Amino acid sequence: MAERQDRTALVRALGSAVRGEVEFGTTARALMTMDASNYRRVPLGVVAPRDADDVAAALAVCRAHAVPVVPRGGGTSIAGQATGTGVVLDLTRHLGKIVELDAASRTAVVQPGVVLDDLCAAAAPHGLTFGPDPSTHSRCTLGGMIGNNACGSHSVAWGTTADNVHALTVARYGGETLRLDRGRWDGAPAGLRELVGSHLALLRTGFPELPRRISGYALDALLPERGPDLARAFCGSEGTLGVMTEATVRLVEAPGSRALAVLGYADEAAAAEAAPGLLPYRPLTVEGMAADLVREPAGLPRGGAWLFVETGGDTPAEARAHAERILRAADAVDGDVVTDPAGQRALWRIREDASGTATRMPDGSEAWPGWEDCAVPPARLGPYLRDFRALLTAHGLRGTPYGHFGDGCIHVRIDFDLLSGDGLARFRRFSEELAALVVAHGGSLSGEHGDGQARAELLPRMYGDELVTLFGRFKDLWDPDGGMNPGILARPARLDENIRFDVLPKRPVDVTFGYPHDGGDFTAAVRRCVGVAKCRTAHPAGTDVMCPSFRATGEEAHSTRGRARLLHEMLAGEVVTDGWRSQEVRDALDLCLSCKGCRSDCPVGVDMATYKAEFLHHHYRGRLRPATHYVMGRLPQWLRLAAPVAPVLNALARIRPFASLAKRLAGITAERTIPVLAGETFTRWARKRRGRGTVILSSDQVVTVWPDTFTNHLSPEVGKAAVRVLEAAGRTALYPERGVCCGLTYVSTGQLDKARTVMRRTLNRMGFSLGDPLVVLEPSCAATLRTDLPELLPDDPRAAELAGSVRTLAQYLEEYAPDWQPPRLDRRVVGQTHCHQHAVLGDAAERRLRERAGLEGELSGGCCGLAGNFGFERGHWDVSVACAEEQLLPSVRGADPGTDILADGFSCRTQLAQLAGVRARHLAELLAEGLDGPAAHPSGN
């Protein structure tokens, strides 16, 4: 009772003092239990301050109530320092302003929640950038970078974050504000100058000299010969001293052009030994990675490991010449210089996604952080890596090292068993031995991401007890009450405490999907999310899709990571206590568009569309469902019933009162227009054209066209066009003789028992060899057949056989009619690659077919926002429109007159018609029109 009263008093006091949000509910707490580390701590609540005054006010209230505070940015920390048991300050929601950018002085003043990419984008028009660039640059914040002294791939040229900070404004626990500048003791807590002055010898001899020494507090920055530099000493303090509310940072001149020398070596040790020899050439990066991190061919030169050496220049020729000099000087097995920006981006993406892809070993088993970024002197990196590999082998562990070879900093995820007592004991033994190995090579336990809970316990092995005791006294001068992020850095928690998997079920949860990549274990599937938060990017890279609902709302709960965190807590049962009946989880999943973007764009393959379907299946079992589940979720059966009276229903839908009543009863948002039903279905047209009872032959000249629900009942013109194209390619198009359905709408609404029934009936009715190619025109249905079918019927071999036979029209033509020449259309197109095609099927064949047909222009990435039933459901209109406005609608509005609008998905075409008033068409339609000659090419606009 007293604890509840204390909490109520705290909430009331914060609500009175802070103008930002004060959230102590289940969802807010569950979202902040973890960062990107192995650790989990449950906070009391979350405060999102609106400005620096709010930060100070919150700190004052928390001190008065003796409640600890954890400052948090993007939550991508991998050592556990962004988790805590008190009040979490969410500095991303309101404190993301670039206060000032002065190109002349090459400085910027930023708030803590500014995302690094946003700062770089603002600096780019002036030819400037911020030097440090962690792989999480699209979502990490300047406050988090300063807290952890982040570095990134360009640190060989531009240093760490601490090297690029001029001044800081910080708030201490209790609310006092200090200004920290270089060369001045003003702003220092009382007693700090005396503490430094009385330990000068220790501070001059106790710190190893290496470029990536991040561990511990940077007390040597306060030596007289180095400033003193209070701002630098604050960098890397991991939220344990105070909260940065404003920073003045240095900007550097960005090269006008860049080139990338990719150097292949026999193995990672050879690459590591070569890296220091490249530094005199003043490259921008010297990054390393080994073959066991590359999951598929990526255009890399020969070798078992590679160095990515980026160079800059005022012109492309200058940058290339610089890279070629390095290529000639390098003693590499093979090498190449890449100057094409798209090619460079593709290679860098392999490196940047490593923080996620490294969490899965090549055989699919799990790997974890914990020893993510220790560093040694660059000249020692080769021998260190050999010793490191030997230590892994001695403990029966595996890892995939990669990282900043030019700075001697190695990232690695290791296949620790963090689920059992024996596994945790081995984790501790290995950690202790690895710490000794790093120190033996003259290194630092942390070379980038800080110590957090993962390594701080072992700091005495690196610095000795005397210096670590001094760290504690330094912390106490800043934070005498111990309220700032306790358990981190000074007097840390044990490295094997607070492991986030401890609370998860020990036995597999009863589920419906097969989860083949996770051993059938839903808990293991949820564990896939390690928190690197690529789903939190405000601007997707290239054609990426993930995560449209986060970009529309900006709320953590509507990111893939946020939903995974809630599912984790649902399984744990401590914060989210209602299990599958949880309203908090349902609300977070409600705005998931089931776009499947995370399945391909998430570095670890989190599949939130499947998790959502699984959750809805359990959540509504034995309960009344929303009206749209009965209407949109069972659309195939309603459309079959409606087909004979389609003209009558179309006429009724044009009568406003009738349409309004129908939408209200069906749970459809009032803003939507009911789609027009086809007067003649595709299957009826096909039967009339070819007759019934056709014998299906096993021949390369015969192809089966899948009559999906949308093509059949809503856009039969797409099916007719595809048949014409296939016939022009010398193929005979055939169709399943009886009604079939992929089960898409049942899956997306979580009606999984019905979905499996429909799928089994479809398999029984196919009536031809399941191994023969099957052309599916609707991307959503193709994706369902390719993935959901075998995952819902894992014990039926026919499901996997049918899934393997699925092809898009372009894939089929490329594979089975490679010599067919499509008609030359020679027109520009805009539109969108369907999100399911992007995520599951890929669009490479479509790109090549468009190129052969003379269709020029790139299609948009992202999601159209309609996403099947999602955009029709009441309460989703605003998010649906926001998703469309992100990329699709601007690309269409900006198109030149006469440009064709291309969209293979029925949802995408419907969204364009209803929001932009334009007619979009399937690629099959454009090709079919081209078969009749130039006169038959009306614009789709």
Image: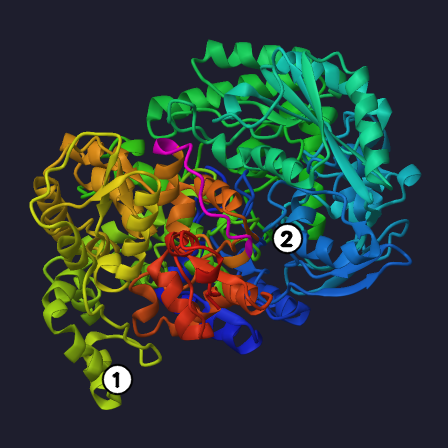
Amino acid, disc 1: Arg
Mark 1 element type: loop
Find residue 501 and report its image quarter.
Answer: top left
Extent of the magenta region: 815-827
Mark 2 or 1, closer to the camera? 1
Q: Residue at x 57, y 30 (%)?
A: 372
| Residue 158 falls inside the magenta stretch | no
Direction bottom: furthest residue: 657
Q: Residue at x 37, y 27 (%)?
A: 364
Q: Is residue 292 above or below residue 509?
A: above
Q: Which mark is residue 654?
A: 1
Q: Which residue is mark 2?
A: 141
Rendering coords of residue 250 (x, y %): 82, 51
Count residues near mark 1 (Cα–Cα under 10 Å), then give few for <14, some for 14-19, many for 20+: few
Amino acid, disc 2: Thr
Between the residue at mark 2 and the residue at mark 1, the CA separation in whole angstroms equals 51 Å
